[in-house]
Amino acid sequence: MTKEENILTDSFGRKHNYLRISLTEKCNLRCTYCMPESGVLLTPRNQLMNAKEVLEIARLFVKNGVTKIRLTGGEPLLRKDVPEILEGLSNLPVELTITTNAILIDRHIEILKASSLKTINVSLDTLHPEKFNTITKRDQFKKAFDNIELLLQEGFHVKLNVVLLKDFNDTEIIDFIEFTKNKPISVRFIEFMPFDGNSWNKSKLVSYEELLNQVKQNYSSDVLIPLANEENFTARNYKIQGYEGSFGIISSVTNPFCDVCNRIRLTANGKLKNCLFSTSETDLLTSYRKGESIEPIIQEAILKKKAVRSGMNSLEDFEDLMNHNNRSMITIGG
Ligand code: SAM
Ligand code: SF4
């Protein structure tokens, strides 16, 4: 297959080999930056991809060049058929990953161990139980924390996703870095992004620059070690000399990674999003159910991908995203 024929290559030559599949719009937590206060209108069950459809559509993407699949949501481990999905995807020649809030890890640990998953991304925004209750609106800190320990004991590589919010958990940046001292964990600080219903505003953002300044005030340059960027990197990674783990900063707001973007997203109801911030999406599931070939539809969607953040070139445009009609994060799948 030549580069031009590859349906996952866009008009800027970016090859999309990383597919993020949302398994559900439902969640057992209510993180304020993700789930709108008013809740979300759930897609009727019969319009969501069933396990067989998830696997067949994933297989088609793999045939066309996808080499990495991440399961996300909502909370992906809430799906009753998650064992079937994990087993099916483990048989594909891809790097399989998952992003979870960890609440149901203990329930699924044997299934996770039997799958091809090696790395698990867990979202945890604070190391304090009361603050966890505030941000997630659920009293589940201990469960999440114990399950992170369980994942480490079982030999998974754990990446901790921490969405930074000004005056909420920016005071815990150093605590999170210290958390990597004796644990082989990669902490990933994420800039707070605007989505439908999450009351984003610039004053709540903790930027890459602010974060790094705080880090530099606490650690001298001889112990703060920048790590090499991975291919198609989204995080700038560092470690403190002698610490077991590392940390990284994902600056999607102040310093996006669009030029090396290799990601596409499939929502739980089978819509393809060519960019996290695109307000349009392409329905694959309806055509798939009619028995039509969806490859030309996928290619058309990929070719429509814009160079930068779905056409929002400046930070001002991006700030205006709240006025666009994008989905809430919980229904996109982060
Ligand atoms: N429920 C799972 C979890 O929380 O890990 C998976 C779905 S969640 C939508 C995926 C990731 O998106 C999480 O790491 C979450 O912190 C991140 N996220 C959600 N809303 C965000 C926002 N407004 N800005 C930045 N990251 C966000
Ligand atoms: Fe649920 Fe994850 Fe969104 Fe929190 S970030 S509400 S855990 S989907």
Image (cartoon, grey):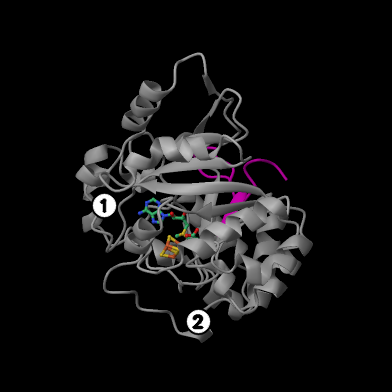
| Disc 2 from disc 1: Cα separation | 27 Å
In which quadrant is the N terminus drawn?
Answer: top right
Give the vertical position of 146 relative to 245 (above or below): below
For residue 42, which quarter of the picture?
Answer: bottom left
Of 96 and 241, the residue lying toward us: 241
**Residue type, numbered disc 2:** Gln
Prevailing secondary structure class for the magenta stretch in the rendered image: loop
Of 306 and 144, the residue lying toward us: 144
> What residue sits 52% from the left and 40% below the top?
179
> What residue sits 33% from the left and 45% below the top?
311
Q: Position of residue 257 (x, y in %)?
A: 45, 36
Residue hosting label 2:
47
Q: Is residue 280 visible?
A: no
Q: Position of residue 85 (x, y in %)?
A: 68, 70
Q: Residue 6: say if magenta.
A: yes
Extreme residue toward the top, this view = 222
Left or right position of 331 against 285: left
Of 69 and 147, the residue lying toward us: 147
**Residue type, numbered disc 1:** Leu
Earlier residue among tags 2 and 1: 2
Residue hosting label 1:
321
Q: Residue 248: say if magenta.
A: no
Q: Is mark 1 within 8 Å of ligand 1?
A: no
Q: Secondary structure at mark 2?
A: helix
Residues rendered magenta in the picture = 1-20
> What residue sits 61% from the left and 37% below the top?
182
